[in-house]
Each structure stands twice: as structure tokens, then as C-alpha cells.
């Protein structure tokens, strides 16, 4: 996806993702709600101005029926990501790139593991979930001069929703 087409440094995002149920032959034969395993994966790249993130993740989840219509799913994604910062794409006022401790050290490339955790409860009527991205809070780089290292921030996401019947044919 290209955003802000025609603008210099406009964000560009690409991802490819797939998922499916594992070991589900017995699920179709049984009338009883049963737990099942799921697996998937994703590759992505996201470029925004001077920063680029590229990564690949493999995912696993287990889905447990709480009753015939409500499932609780918990899982994780593990893989890697590469973070890149290109200071040549930054133009500070008055040519101060040489004096700035971030832009005067050249390009930064950091390759690191990545981990995401989450849980999700859902039915045909509602859903609620919570997930934590970039669990490891990896260090990207340290700038000379004793400053604290840059780190990837952990991100907590909370989601929820309810399906309202608007009309007998619209949900």
C-alpha cells in the first residue's frame, strides 16, 4: 500500500499473511465443540521516511470452546525483524545533521528477534481481545556520548465489539 502518493518519503507498506486450522479432521465428525490448533505466518515491510521495518513471523494459537458458541483463543507469534534508519533521508534545519547525535553516526541496521502474545474471546455476537506486540523491547542502537540506547516500544492493544442486528438480513 502506498500512502501519500507523490510525496517524498511517503509511507509504503507490504505484507503477506496466511493462517489455518491444524489437525482438524476430527472436528468435522463431532457435534461436540472441541478445542483446535491454528497456525499461520506473515512477512512484511513498512517504510516511513528514514525508517524501514522488515520482518517474518510464525504464529500458533489454541482455540478452546467455553461452551457451544463462545471460544477463547490464546497464541503467540515469533520471528525476527530488521530495523533500519537512514539518516541521509533526514534534513535538519541549518544543516545541523552533522551536529545531531542521531543523524551523524550513519546508517543503523538492527536485526532482532520479535515476539507477540495475545488472547481473544469471541462468539457470533461479540469479541474482546488483548495483545502485546514487541514483547522483548529490543535494543536498536546506542549513540556515543552515554545516551540511553534506543529500544522498540511494547504496544498493548485492546479490542472489542458487538454485532447488532440492524435488519433481519443485515448484521
Image (cartoon, rainbow, N blue to C red):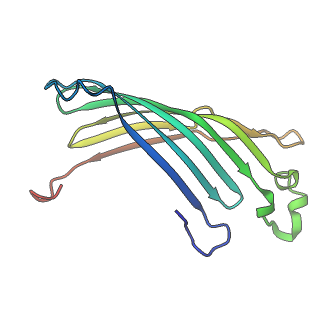
In which image quadrant can residue 13 be found? bottom right
In which image quadrant can residue 68 be found? top left
Apparent side of residue 39 relative to residue 107 in the rendered image (left or right): left
Apparent side of residue 8 relative to residue 162 in the rendered image (left or right): right
Apparent side of residue 144 relative to residue 36 in the rendered image (left or right): right
- Residue lying farthest to the left in this orientation: 168
Q: Is residue 115 visible?
A: no
The total number of labels drawn is: 0
- Residue lying farthest to the bottom in this orientation: 6
- Residue lying farthest to the front in this orientation: 25
Q: Is residue 73 visible?
A: yes
Quadrant into which the C terminus falls: bottom left
Q: How far across and how far down the image is residue 162, in percent?
A: 25, 47
- Residue 155 in the image: above or below residue 166: above
* Residue in the foreground of this view, choosing between 36 and 150: 36
**Measuring 40% from the left and 29% from the top, which residue is drawn there?**
61
Q: How far across and how far down the image is residue 72, in percent?
A: 31, 29
* Residue in the foreground of this view, choosing between 134 and 58: 58
**Measuring 58% from the left and 34% from the top, which residue is drawn there?**
79
Q: How far across and how far down the image is residue 154, in percent?
A: 58, 38
Q: How far across and how far down the image is residue 41, in percent?
A: 48, 39
* Residue in the foreground of this view, choosing between 3 and 152: 3
**Measuring 76% from the left and 63% from the top, which residue is drawn there?**
89
Amino acid at each position: 500500500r502506498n500512502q501519500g502518493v507523490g510525496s517524498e518519503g511517503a509511507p509504503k507498506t507490504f505484507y503477506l499473511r496466511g493462517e489455518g486450522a491444524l489437525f482438524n479432521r476430527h472436528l468435522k465428525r463431532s457435534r461436540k465443540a472441541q478445542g483446535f490448533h491454528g497456525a499461520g505466518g506473515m512477512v512484511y515491510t513498512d517504510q516511513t521516511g528514514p525508517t524501514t521495518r522488515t520482518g517474518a513471523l510464525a504464529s500458533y494459537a489454541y482455540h478452546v470452546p467455553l461452551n457451544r458458541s463462545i471460544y477463547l483463543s490464546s497464541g503467540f507469534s515469533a520471528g525476527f525483524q530488521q530495523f533500519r534508519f537512514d539518516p541521509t533521508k533526514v534534513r535538519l534545519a541549518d544543516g545541523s545533521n552533522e551536529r545531531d547525535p542521531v543523524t551523524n553516526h550513519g546508517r543503523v541496521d538492527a536485526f532482532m528477534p520479535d515476539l507477540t502474545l495475545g488472547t481473544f474471546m469471541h462468539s457470533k455476537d461479540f469479541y474482546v481481545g488483548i495483545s502485546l506486540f514487541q514483547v522483548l523491547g529490543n535494543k536498536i542502537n546506542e549513540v556515543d556520548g552515554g545516551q540511553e540506547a534506543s529500544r522498540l516500544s511494547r504496544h498493548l492493544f485492546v479490542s472489542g465489539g458487538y454485532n447488532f442486528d440492524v435488519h433481519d438480513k443485515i448484521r
